[in-house]
Image (tube, grey):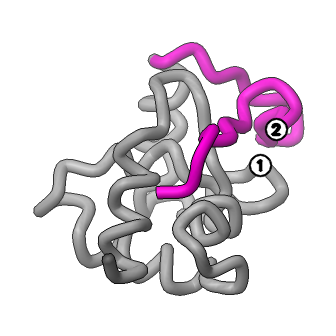
Amino acid sequence: MTFTEKALAVIQSIPEGKVMTYGSVAAAAGSPRGARQVVRVLHSLSDKEGLPWHRVVNREGRISLERGRGYELQKALLEDEGVVFGLTERIDLDTYLWQPSTSA
């Protein structure tokens, strides 16, 4: 199975109301240093594969998209799932980070 296939499986398995970081998706897919590849997978395959792209955030628990370029949509989708943002627009990763039980 390729890294892309593994990353797709990991992203598809993130449950509602939880998030993963780009790096944690990469690590679960077998490439701990592949965070940028996860960005590429999300950018190129989210629509085609119906990925829950909004559940992937940066390592600080923040949305990486710029305001006016998807930020508001991602935040709204996460809030609809019960994810709470702090005053500094961060997600508490201790609360919302999902760790898959096994690698994809």
Residue 86 is tagged as none
Secondary structure found at label 1: loop
Q: CA distance from mark 1 to mark 2?
A: 6 Å
**Rendered view: 26 above or below 13:** below
Of the residues shown, which amino acid type is indicated by label 1?
Gly
**x and y percentages locating residue 64 in the rendered image:** 62, 64
Seen at 41% across and 40% down, the residue is 13
Residue count near mark 2 (Cα–Cα under 10 Å), binned few <14, some 14–19, many ≥20:
some
Left or right for 72, reference 94: left
Query: Residue 48 versus residue 34: which sits nearer the camera?
Result: 34
Of the residues shown, which amino acid type is indicated by label 2?
Leu
Secondary structure found at label 2: helix
Seen at 77% across and 36% down, the residue is 91
Span highlighted in magenta in the image: 81-104
Residue 93 is tagged as 2
Query: In the figure, residue 93 lies in which quadrant?
Result: top right
Query: Residue 23 versus residue 9: which sits nearer the camera?
Result: 9
**x and y percentages locating residue 30 in the rendered image:** 58, 74
Query: Residue 93 versus residue 62: which sits nearer the camera?
Result: 93
Q: Main secondary structure of the magenta part?
A: loop
Seen at 26% across and 77% down, the residue is 44
Left or right for 1, reference 72: left
Are the two marked residues, 1 and 2, in contact with CB atoms closer than 8 angstroms? yes
Residue 61 is tagged as 1
**Rendered view: 7 above or below 55:** below
Residue count near mark 1 (Cα–Cα under 10 Å), binned few <14, some 14–19, many ≥20:
many
Left or right for 97, reference 7: right
In the rendered image, which quarter contains the N terminus? bottom left
Q: Earlier in the sequence, mark 1 or mark 2?
A: 1
Farthest residue to the left: give it. 48
**Rendered view: 75 above or below 102:** above
